[in-house]
């Protein structure tokens, strides 16, 4: 069984930084892409950043230059370094692992979400 566990959310002042972590556990052979989505109250879930197993990254325009995604394939982990945070970054952040191939499991998996609040 595959599980994604996120950590690193919290409350931060505008202009501050946070680092989110997500680790996928289970008998995993490969994960094509890992990344982060977010959902603010009353809004749809949106892409923040993704990273493929080959190292290709993709960012939402709203976070380019402020957020950096990184991935440790050996640990099945993905990280999101968030700098220069703004109140509009406030949301629940969800980790996703796409196209997992594992023993007795395959497909896309989501984490449970971690709250990020940017407020003074």
Image (tube, rainbow, N blue to C red):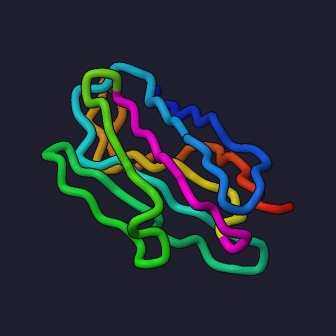
Q: Residue at x 47, y 46 (%)?
A: 80
Circle count: 0
Instruction: Please state, as top left, top right, bottom left or bottom right, where the C terminus lies in the image.
Output: bottom right
Q: Nearer the viewer, residue 86 or 102?
A: 86
In the image, residue 105 lies at what x, y percent?
Answer: 36, 34
Outermost residue, left side:
54
26 shown above or below 112 = above
Q: Residue at x 45, y 50 (%)?
A: 96
Report if residue 79 lies within the magenta region: yes
78 shown above or below 46 = above
39 shown above or below 95 = below
In the image, residue 111 lies at what x, y percent?
Answer: 57, 43
27 shown above or below 11 = above
Q: Residue at x 18, y 47 (%)?
A: 55
Q: Residue at x 46, y 26 (%)?
A: 1
Query: In this rendering, would 55 be left or right of 10?
Result: left
In the image, residue 38 lies at what x, y percent?
Answer: 59, 63
Query: In this rendering, would 27 be left or right of 13?
Result: left
In the image, residue 37 lies at what x, y percent?
Answer: 52, 61
Q: Which residues are magenta?
A: 76-88
Query: In this rendering, would 8 be left or right of 14?
Result: left
């Amino acid at each position: 069984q595959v599980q994604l566990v996120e950590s690193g959310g919290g409350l931060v002042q505008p202009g501050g930084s946070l680092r989110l972590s997500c680790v996928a556990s289970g008998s995993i052979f490969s994960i094509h892409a890992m990344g982060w989505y977010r959902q603010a109250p009353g809004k749809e879930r949106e892409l923040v950043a993704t990273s493929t197993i080959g190292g290709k990254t993709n960012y939402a325009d709203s976070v380019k230059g402020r957020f950096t995604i990184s991935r440790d394939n050996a640990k099945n982990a993905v990280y999101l370094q968030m700098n220069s945070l703004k109140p509009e970054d406030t949301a629940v952040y969800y980790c996703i692992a796409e196209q997992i191939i594992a023993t007795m499991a395959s497909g896309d998996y989501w984490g449970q979400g971690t709250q990020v609040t940017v407020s003074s």
